[in-house]
Amino acid sequence: MGTDTVRAGSADEAAERRREQRGWYFYDWACSVYSTSVLTVFLGPYLTSVAKSAADADGFVHPLGIPVRAGSFFAYSVSLSVIAAVLVMPLVGAAADRTGRKKPLLAAAAYTGAAATTGMFFLDGDRYLLGGALLIVANAAQSVAMMLYNSYLPQIAPPEERDAVSSRGWAFGYAAGALVLVANLVLYTAHDSFGLSESAAVRICLACAGLWWGAFALIPLRRLRDRRNETSKATAPGVRQLAATVRDMRRHPLTLAFLLAYLVYNDGIQTVISQASVYGSEELGLGQSTLIGAVLLVQVLAVAGALTMGRLARIYGAKRTILGSLVAWTLTLGAGYFLPAGAPVWFFVLAAGIGLVLGGSQALSRSLFSHLVPPGKEAEYFAAYEMSDRGMSWLGPLLFGITYQVTGSYRDAIISLVAFFVVGFVLLARVPVRRAIGDAGNPVPERI
């Protein structure tokens, strides 16, 4: 009788864990549309056109009296959003660990971002300042929400399930991004048939991303649950908490070693994503429709790539699978260097290669890091993880820009990014992950 009771309890616990995991997946489904449709496709060109319509005869706008080239306004707004996120994330992460109440903080960040994105519908005429402010709020809120969302992973999945759970989350996100992007492209390309101007079609696409984000965020907020944290000692507010987090991480040098490796190779990944369209348009002479189609292909194949690499991790371990993906990234960039101009088919082949390794390398990095986080410090450490992602993602674009400035060749610029994957490979290969997991106070999975 006692054995039956234990089995029933274990079955109930497993069912509740599965329910919570399914709810967790849906936050990726909710927010990835913002990254795909808003940041990657529509907002950059549209906000730049709005800024240009407000510019003076010399092509400058003057936010707060500061002369800024209209063509640079979007990039500067993104940079300010990164700074805002880096300042806020450690404070929110410490508060989440201290109180154990992640869900209200996740809700606040998610709906702040969704509301700001929905408000982009009103971005018309010469309202470039409104667009910049909404972008800064939405992007910073997205970073904070992702930090909280990621910090749930070690709580909702035991060590042996994390690679698969993380990979499914990324797959959900890429699937949603592809689905909504298809609908947006139909509306955008056929806006005349719907009686809409091009500007109105773009503003509807932007607002719909915010509405999608807010609507589907309800699912994880209903299913995820708060856990009272008995082990966290995060009590210092403000900058003192950030300093305390850094000091604590120094007691786990192997966790820091992994973060350094991730910082390097993820910077390469983010730069390829952001600069591939520039390479396609400026070096290969491809049109906007080809570039958007390539973005869509990346989204679709990233679903399959994330799930496939999740299965490979069960066989070979997460570390080896990530190392294999970095080799694939290097080969993909090498192939990209030799792409002929004016040949969209080969650019789609390159996009397919990127899609197949993109989701898996990011998903497995997240799950591997979750093993390296000391218990009770999930949000605090994932704040540092997210800051490594957001706060240092300027190194790759800087190298890309300097290489182009020196050589005048986008081909040389794109191949220069191989350095991030080679250095990241070497740094990750040197991390003894089994010992790092044990030093963090976590059980070591059979295969990692």
Image (tube, rainbow, N blue to C red):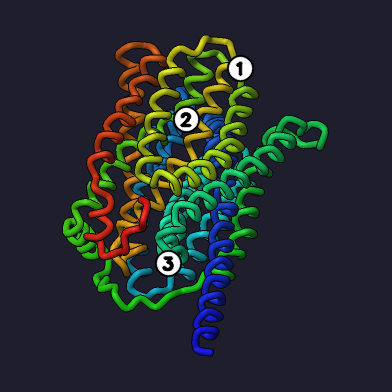
Instruction: Work out whether 65 lies above or below 155.
Output: above
Looking at the image, is mark 3 or mark 2 earlier in the sequence?
2
Q: Which one is in front in this view, the residue at disc 2 or the one at disc 1?
A: 1
Q: Amino acid at mark 1?
A: Val
Q: Nearer the viewer, residue 447 or 110?
A: 447
Give how far across and how far down residue 446 sits, in percent. 36, 56
Q: Which mark is residue 345?
A: 1
Q: Which residue is mark 3?
A: 155
Q: Which one is in front in this view, the residue at disc 3 or the one at disc 2?
A: 3
In contact (CB < 8 Å): disc 1 and disc 3: no
Q: Amino acid at mark 3?
A: Gln
Give how far across and how far down residue 63 sits, in percent. 42, 40
- Which residue is rendered at x = 36% and y = 58% of the image? 445
Give how far across and how far down residue 49 sits, in percent. 56, 30
Calculate the distance from the C-alpha at mark 3 to the C-alpha at mark 2: 45 Å
Looking at the image, is mark 1 or mark 3 earlier in the sequence?
3
In contact (CB < 8 Å): disc 3 and disc 2: no
- For mark 2, give the secondary structure: helix
Q: Which residue is mark 2?
A: 70
Q: Residues within 10 Å of mark 3 (few under 14, many from 20)?
A: some
Q: Residues within 10 Å of mark 1 (few under 14, many from 20)?
A: few
- For mark 1, give the secondary structure: helix
- Which residue is rendered at x = 40% and y = 40% of the image? 321
Give how far across and how far down residue 8 sits, in percent. 56, 80
Task: State left or right for residue 310 relative to residue 88.
Answer: right
- Which residue is rendered at x = 34% and y = 25% of the image? 418
In contact (CB < 8 Å): disc 2 and disc 1: no
Q: Nearer the viewer, residue 429 or 109?
A: 429
Looking at the image, is mark 2 or mark 1 earlier in the sequence?
2
